[in-house]
Amino acid sequence: MSDGNKPAGDVKPAKKSWSNPALRAMGVPRISLPSRNWMIFWTLLASVGGGIYYDKKQQKAVRERYMKQVEKLGQETYGTGRLPRKALDFHRSSAR
């Protein structure tokens, strides 16, 4: 009845082999996902960095849109009888 084979329950699964033997020869460790805390850290870092990048890009687009709208006012010349608009300058005092 017994043919000398081990029972099927004792068979260990084979270890995952390297996908690239050149990496194994160079001693590069197997690629695996980082731990939970590192994943949280990198996700937050990428989200904040992406948000800052997106905000700067949108600010530049809005600024260019407004500059394009008022460009014709900058090209306008004043006649000798027309007074220029008043501009207020706010200066910070040098003494702190």
Image (cartoon, rainbow, N blue to C red):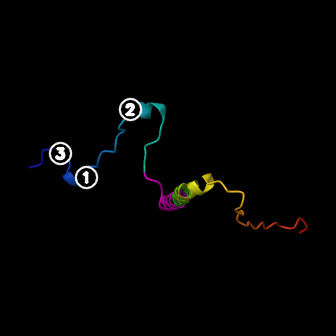
Binning the other alpha carbons within 10 Å of mark 2 as few (below 14), some (14 to 19) or many (20 upward) gives: few
Q: CA distance from mark 2 to mark 3?
A: 33 Å
State the quadrant of the C terminus. bottom right
Q: CA distance from mark 1 to mark 3?
A: 11 Å
Q: Is residue 23 above or below residue 72?
A: above
Task: Name the amino acid type tagged 2.
Answer: Pro
Q: Which mark is residue 21?
A: 2
Task: Name the amino acid type tagged 3.
Answer: Asn
Q: Look at 17% across and 45% down and name the residue there.
A: 5
Q: Which residues are magenta?
A: 33-50
Query: Which-is-in-front pick, marks 1 and 3?
Result: 1
Q: Are marks 2 and 3 in contact (CB under 8 Å)?
A: no
Q: Which residue is mark 1?
A: 10
Q: CA distance from mark 2 to mark 1?
A: 29 Å
Which comes before the other along the chain, label 2 or label 1? 1
Mark 1: secondary structure: helix
Mark 2: secondary structure: helix
Which comes before the other along the chain, label 1 or label 3? 3
